Image (cartoon, grey):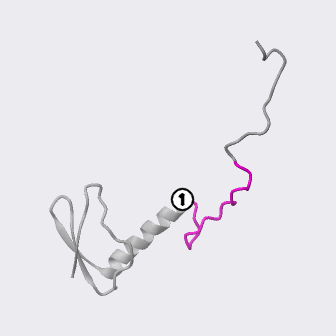
Amino acid sequence: MINLQQDADGFIRMNRHFPGSTLISITFSDGSTEQFSGRQLNKVYDEAVAVYRAENHLDAKGYSRAPKKTVQPSQKIEFVPVHPGMAP
């Protein structure tokens, strides 16, 4: 059996899938305890990963499909608009 503790923000540490038949006991921040199977928590984990990827615009494998940054620096400008009367 694996024992997990919920933190103050309502999360448990789970960075991988657990074996499906393993019993997992979670102690919640209010002191109550519940038991889950690894299969149940793996579903919760998969849903959380899907939400994270959707919010961060990642594909199903976790890769960003946004256009790559250009070679030109984006913080610098090369063209400045001017108009008559700007000089004091």
Kind of residue sitting beneath label 1: Asn
Q: Which residue is at the far top?
A: 88
The x and y percentages for residue 25 are 21, 75
Q: Which residue is mark 1?
A: 56
Instruction: Verify whether residue 86 appears in magenta.
Output: no
Q: On the picture, is 30 further left or further right than 72? A: left
Q: On the picture, is 53 further left or further right than 81? A: left
- Within the image, what quadrant is residue 15 found in? bottom left
Position of 11 relative to 25 (above/below): above
Residue extent of the magenta highlight: 57-73
The x and y percentages for residue 41 are 34, 75
- Within the image, what quadrant is residue 39 found in? bottom left
- Which residue shows up at 66% across the image and 60% down it? 66
In this view of the protein, which residue sits in the foreground, 55 or 14?
A: 14
Q: Which residue is at the far right?
A: 84
* Figure quadrant of the N terminus: bottom left
Q: On the picture, is 31 further left or further right than 12? A: left
